[in-house]
Amino acid sequence: MTTSRIPGQRWYTPYLFPIPALVLFGVFFAWPAVTALQLAFTDYDGVSPPVFAGLDNFVKILGDTRFWTALRNSLLFLAGLFPLLVVLPLPLAVLVNQKLPGIRTFRMLYYLPVVTSMVAVAVAWNYVFHQQGVINWLLTGFGLLDEPIQYLLDPTWALPALILVEGWKSMGVYMMIYLAGLQTIPANLYEAARVDGAGPWHRMRRITVPLMAPYVAVTITMTMLDAMQAFTTVFVMTKGGPQDATLMLGYYIWSEAFENYDMGYASAVGLVLWALLIVMALLNYRLTRGKKVGH
């Protein structure tokens, strides 16, 4: 079997097309990754030449209480986002998959936060959580609170507030993933279940959930990546406070690099986060048995 060639076409023409993508990959991913790997073993302040420090940065991590606080908060953030981004979007996707009046408008409104800037969302929610904001106004109005709460200045409420904001902002993405999966399930399975007398809950448990397992695996991985690298929400709303209650790894790395000018140490923490994400992704892959979307 011979391969036809367009007249005048050079043999190397097809290989030219991936060059722009490869250049972007090299400039914005490969080169920064290699540089971070090198800096992790140095003492570097961003101005003076890097000085080789061996494993000093990694030894420092073991005794750094703020690192462990950031890791704990990131894991709590992930645990809080799990029901909002993995569990709740599935029944919502089932709802919007129905042929109901106005369902397209509902889909659009539900997806609107996703395409809104995270900075704009965080600023808006700052006012919602303010002492004179909507939440306090409602709760005090209904007599559920005696006095307003400073949510973002209270170590007890600050992290749950960020979880709520991040979940509200991102939920539409996960709902759309599930919606795409639901539309691949043959309708005759549900029809057969109805004929056999299966109710909505039984159909959800016996048909929808098992067949959506590959999509659930995707959403779990995406949730882990987003939660462990959260930055914008923390930066705009709390700056890691109060009392490091919302200090998370993504923000901590930025703080060490651009506030404390310890870029070698920040790179080391970044490598630890990278390794942690790989372990979590592999664990998720193992638990979901490597299922792929569409299989």
Image (spheres, helix red, strand yellow):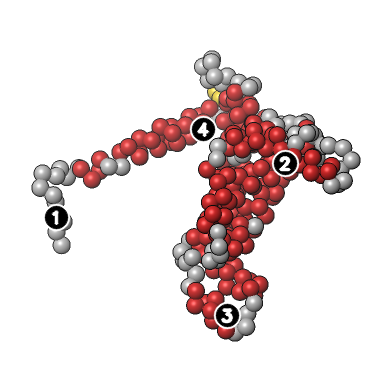
Q: Secondary structure at mark 4?
A: helix
Q: Nearer the viewer's eye, disc 4 or disc 2?
A: 2
* SS at mark 3 in the image: helix
Toward the right, the furthest residue is 146
In this rendering, the label closer to the viewer, 4 or 1 = 1
User: In what element is the residue under mark 2?
Assistant: helix
Q: Amino acid at mark 2?
A: Ala
Q: Residue type at mark 1? A: Ser
Disc 1 vs disc 2: Cβ atoms closer than 8 Å? no
Say which of marks 1 and 2 sits in front: 2
Which circle, 4 or 3, is nearer the viewer? 3
Frontmost residue, 178 versus 219: 178
| Amino acid found under the numbered disc labelled 4 | Leu
Q: Label 4, label 1: how many angstroms apart (C-alpha)?
A: 45 Å
Q: What's the distance in space between the residues labelled 3 and 2, CA to CA?
A: 41 Å
Q: Is residue 71 left or right of residue 137?
A: left
Q: Read off the residue under disc 2.
A: 161
- Please give the residue where the numbered disc 4 appears in the rendered image: 37
- The amino acid at mark 3 is Ala
Q: CA distance from mark 4 to mark 2?
A: 34 Å
Q: Which residue is mark 1?
A: 4
Say which label, 1 or 3, has the lower sequence index.
1
Q: Quadrant of residue 22?
A: top left
